[in-house]
Amino acid sequence: MIRETATVCERCVLTTSVPGVSLDEEGVCNVCREYEANRSTYDAYFKTEDDLAALFRRTHSPEAPYDVLLMYSGGKDSTYVLNRLVDMGQRILAVTFDNDYVPKGCFDNIRGVCEDAGVDSLILSLNRATMDRVFARSLEQDSQVCTGCFRALTARGTEVAIEKGIPIVMTGLSRGQIFDTKVHQLLAAGKTDIDEIDRWLRAFRRRYHEQKDEIAELINDRAAADLAAFERVHFIDFFRYCKVTKEDIVALIKERNPAWRKPENVGGCSSNCMINDVGIKVHQETKGYHNYAVPAAWDVRFGHETREEVLEELETDLDERRIHGILTQLKINYHVKDGAV
Ligand SMILES: [Zn+2]
């Protein structure tokens, strides 16, 4: 679909449909050229597993019931992280946010993986009516479902960490996702000092949870209610410290969790969420490009996935009937192609 409707960069997966993206005479996009010119500066944000081990030694507190609260979706990336944290000797609380569109197969995976690893699992949720309003608002505001859900899950995870005195909240965001959502804008604005970037990101996070908007009200975001406690929590993206390919992730899960299966009804870009495709569809229809394209393009540049693998994921057919059914339920009147809702 992507290749038919727009010109794709020869190196990554960006197309000229993405705002600000252009291709040069060699068919390479301006973001790939930007990375090429700044590679050492951009790569410097990422650290090593030794750095992570040192951080664990610094934050370890024998009085805390756990060392790490892992935001555990049950998908591939966070399952890999869970296994690796166990190898690193960390005491983990695996927190799953049930957004009400998590398939049964995913809960089977979560139970199986946590049992295999001897890790405690905590599943948190909001009711369906509230989550549907969060998704509807998120679609109206950002043309995708992930932003509202992410606010809810980070708020709940942070609140639990504060309540239980767990020093680290950890995510399984890929390097591409980390770069797209947090770091690139700072580097591109000339902020190249890593400590300064970390300070900015902490400030952004605080402002994010202090923001009093409709989604904050719906989910009752209390993460930053006690600022001193909030400031004590370390927010760590595992893959900032670990360079790994998608192949490595799949191989480790096959070895450690042979019963793990990709659930049905989750589409091509998710291994744990049934509403994800709705966001993809609405984003494509309203913005003209796939909402995974920008982070996935970074994952290609960082060598996490090949260009062909990502193009295949981005071109996975969407189940239009299922998407229309969910949009109707959310009471959203999008007139999408292939049949109006
Ligand atoms: Zn490119």
Image (cartoon, helix red, strand yellow):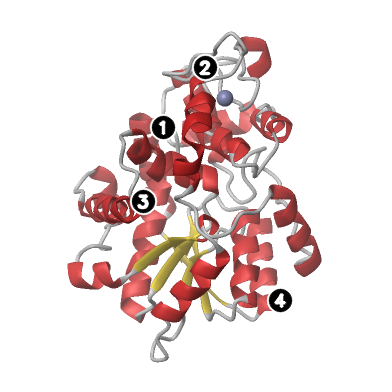
Q: Nearer the viewer, residue 269 or 105?
A: 269
Q: Quote the CA–CA distance across marks 3 and 4.
A: 29 Å
Sequence order check, earlier mark of 3 and 1 = 3
**Seen in the image, is 83 located left or right of residue 331?**
right
Q: Which residue is mark 4?
A: 116
Q: CA distance from mark 3 to mark 1?
A: 21 Å
Q: Label 2 to label 4, Cα distance in Å?
A: 46 Å
Instruction: Look at label 1 and name its amino acid.
Output: Lys
Given residues 30 and 37, the one toward you in this image is 37
Residue nearer the viewer, 128 or 233: 233
Badges 3 and 1: C-beta atoms under 8 Å apart? no
**Which callout, 3 or 1, points to the residue nearer the camera?**
3
Q: Disc 1 on helix, strand or loop?
A: loop
Q: Which residue is mark 3?
A: 151
Residue drawn where x is 31% and y is 52% of the image? 201
Q: Residue 331: give its label.
A: 1
16, above or below 257, in the image: above
Q: Between disc 3 and disc 4, whose residue precedes? A: 4
